[in-house]
Amino acid sequence: MRASQHPAVVEFLDRFSAMMEPEGLPRPAGRMLGLFFVDGGPFTAEELSERLQISRSNVSTTVRLLESLGVVHRTRMPGERTDRFRLHDDPFVPMLQASVMRANRMRTLVRECRSALPASLKPAAQRLRPLEQFFGHAAEWLAGMAGAWPGGRRPRG
């Protein structure tokens, strides 16, 4: 039995993907990422389609998303023409970097809103200030965590 077929892993993939969805990762991407963590890989597109019970076009879309996040990369075995996909050796730093960028985008959004408010809405601008500070601190904390991770580097963002 493959690890991905064990009932505990099937449940893990379902729950992991459900927990990643609010973080902006579609369920198929969450399931695929969970599969890479559990089963390692590398996998062909056909193997991913079979194991995750999703279409080849969905595999292609999902792999491109995970590649763009820096957590999965494409490889080929010597003598083969088929692409295989595997988990990045250290996917955690790219995941943290993505979180830093999201926190910075939120901080910028709040800051822009605050600065666009007229003086007559000063109380609203003041109420938004802690939210701006929160996202600023979150970005700094996550960047520090990425930098402290073994093999990590200080993320941009």
Image (cartoon, helix red, strand yellow):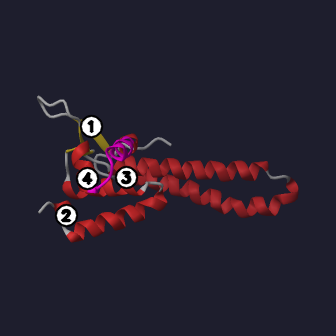
The verdict on residue 58 being magenta is yes
Q: Which mark is residue 36?
A: 4
Most foreground residue, 13 or 143: 13
On screen, 49 above or below 20? above
The N terminus: image quadrant:
bottom left
Q: Which mark is residue 29?
A: 3
Q: Which residue is mark 2?
A: 5
Point 29% across, 40% down: residue: 73
The three-letter code of the residue at mark 4 reads Phe
The three-letter code of the residue at mark 2 reads Gln
What percent of the width, then of the height, locates residue 114? 74, 53
- N-term-proximal mark, 4 vs 3: 3
Point 70% across, 48% down: residue: 112
Residue interval drawn in magenta: 52-64
For the residue carrying disc 3, how many other residues have a C-alpha within 10 Å: few (<14), some (14-19), or many (20+)?
many
The three-letter code of the residue at mark 3 reads Ala
Q: Which residue is mark 1?
A: 74
